[in-house]
Amino acid sequence: MRGRPKAPLVLSESQREQLIALTMRRKTAQALALRARIVLACAEGIDNQTVATRQRVTSPTVSKWRSRFINHRVDGLLDAHRAREHRGRSTTPR
């Protein structure tokens, strides 16, 4: 294992089905579908760098969505603005 140890990402069967559905629905926003694909790959035990390469994103992006999923489950992937509200940040323009 390279890098720092990561918290295990374990999916229930219903969470796995929900994420797969997000990747396959035609009306799902592509950003959300990408986040779901990232989480599914991480749950398979693939390291972040490999996931990043396969999904054509950066390692910090994989780390971000992996972490959000671990902390907030599927809700953490849904809306970046809502996630900011949970952290107490303002969502209004400066």
Image (cartoon, rainbow, N blue to C red):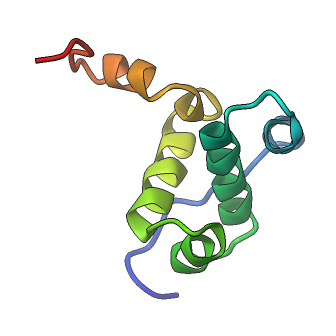
Quadrant of image for the C terminus = top left
Residue appearing at x 44%, y 58% in the figure: 61
Q: Return the x and y of residue 57 as percentages of the image width and height.
A: 51, 65
Pick the front one: 56 or 70: 56
Q: Is residue 4 above or below residue 57?
A: below
Pick the front one: 82 or 10: 82
Q: Return the x and y of residue 40 as percentages of the image width and height.
A: 74, 56
Q: Please, which residue is most extreme toward the top here?
A: 92
Left or right of residue 15: residue 88: left
Q: Is residue 46 above or below residue 81?
A: below
Q: Please, which residue is most extreme toward the bottom here?
A: 1
Q: Is residue 36 above or below residue 42?
A: above
Q: Return the x and y of residue 63 as percentages of the image width and height.
A: 45, 60
Left or right of residue 81: residue 51: right
Left or right of residue 19: residue 45: left
Residue appearing at x 88%, y 42% in the figure: 24
Residue appearing at x 44%, y 29% in the figure: 80
Q: Return the x and y of residue 41 as percentages of the image width and height.
A: 71, 64
Residue appearing at x 44%, y 69% in the figure: 59
Q: Which quadrant of the figure has residue 28?
A: top right
